[in-house]
Image (cartoon, rainbow, N blue to C red):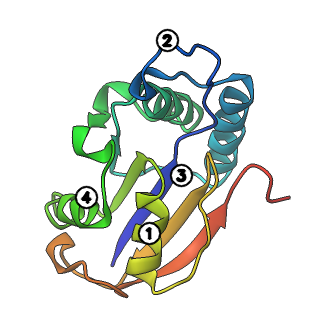
C-alpha cells in the first residue's frame, strides 16, 4: 500500500498587482492557516518519506511552514516545476514515476488540478480542495507505476475552516 497526501497551497495575496501569478506570496491568513494545518499534522505524527512542491512562491512558502511544523527537513523538499499549471495527466505521470522506496509522498500544489486528481484517483466527487486543504489517499498498489483512476480511497480530508 502507498499513501499520497495532496496539499493545496495556503491563501495568497493579490495586493501587489506588479507580481506575476507565480510570484504571489502568502497573505497573513495563509501563513496562519499553513501553521495551523502543520500543527494538526504534527499531532498525528505526520512523517512522509518525501515532499514534492510546486516552485510557485505561495506553494513553496506553504511547504516550508508545514515542513517546519512537522519537523521535516526543508532541504529535502523537491521542487517540481510541472506542478505549476499542471493537469491531471501531468500529475499522474509524476506519481507513476515516484521512487518506490517512498511509501508516503506529499504533493503540494494548485487547483484545479489537485481536486481533479483526487476525484480521478479516488472516484469521488469532491467539489474543491480549499486553500491549505489536505487530502490523504491510500492506494492499494505495490508500485507507484500502478497508479490508475479509482486506485485510491480517501482516508482523511482536512482544511482550515472544517471545524
Of badges 2 and 4, the one in the foreground is 2
The mark nearer the N terminus, 4 or 1, is 4
- Judging from the image, what secondary structure is the residue with disc 2 in? loop
Image position of 6 (left or right of 77):
right
Residue at 53 percent across and 29 percent down: it is: 68
Q: Residues within 10 Å of mark 3 (few under 14, many from 20)?
A: some
The residue at which mark 2 appears reads as: 18
The residue at which mark 1 appears reads as: 116
> Residue 145 appears in which quarter of the rendering?
bottom left
Marker count (numbered): 4
Q: Are marks 1 and 3 in contact (CB under 8 Å)?
A: no
Q: Position of residue 104 (x, y in %)?
A: 36, 60
- CA gap, disc 2 to disc 4? 40 Å
Residue nearest the viewer, comparing 24 with 31: 24
Q: Are marks 1 and 2 in contact (CB under 8 Å)?
A: no
Q: Looking at the figure, which quarter contains the C terminus? A: bottom right
- CA gap, disc 1 to disc 2? 30 Å
Image position of 110 (left or right of 154):
left
Question: Please, is residue 28 above or below residue 134 in the view?
Answer: above
* Mark identifier at residue 102: 4
Q: Residues within 10 Å of mark 1 (few under 14, many from 20)?
A: some
The mark nearer the N terminus, 2 or 3, is 2
Residue at 73 percent across and 30 percent down: it is: 32
Residue at 46 percent across and 87 percent down: it is: 123
Image position of 111 (left or right of 31):
left
- CA gap, disc 1 to disc 3? 24 Å
- CA gap, disc 4 to disc 3? 14 Å
Q: Residues within 10 Å of mark 2 (few under 14, many from 20)?
A: few
The mark nearer the N terminus, 1 or 3, is 3
* Mark identifier at residue 46: 3
Amino acid at each position: 500500500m502507498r499513501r499520497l497526501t495532496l496539499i493545496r497551497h495556503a491563501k495568497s495575496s493579490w495586493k501587489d498587482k506588479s507580481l506575476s501569478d507565480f510570484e504571489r506570496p502568502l497573505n497573513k491568513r495563509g501563513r496562519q492557516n499553513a501553521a495551523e494545518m502543520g500543527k494538526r499534522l504534527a499531532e498525528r505524527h505526520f512523517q512522509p518519506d518525501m515532499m514534492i512542491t510546486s516552485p510557485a512562491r505561495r506553494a513553496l512558502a506553504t511547504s516550508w511552514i508545514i515542513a517546519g511544523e512537522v519537523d521535516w527537513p526543508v532541504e529535502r523538499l523537491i521542487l517540481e516545476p510541472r506542478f505549476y499549471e499542471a493537469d491531471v495527466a501531468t500529475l499522474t505521470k509524476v506519481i507513476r514515476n515516484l521512487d518506490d522506496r517512498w511509501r508516503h509522498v506529499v504533493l503540494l500544489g494548485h487547483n484545479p488540478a489537485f481536486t481533479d486528481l483526487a476525484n480521478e484517483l479516488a472516484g469521488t466527487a469532491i467539489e474543491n480542495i480549499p486553500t491549505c486543504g489536505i487530502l490523504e489517499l491510500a492506494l492499494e498498489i505495490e508500485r507507484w507505476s500502478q497508479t490508475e483512476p479509482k486506485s485510491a480511497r480517501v482516508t482523511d480530508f482536512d482544511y482550515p475552516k472544517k471545524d
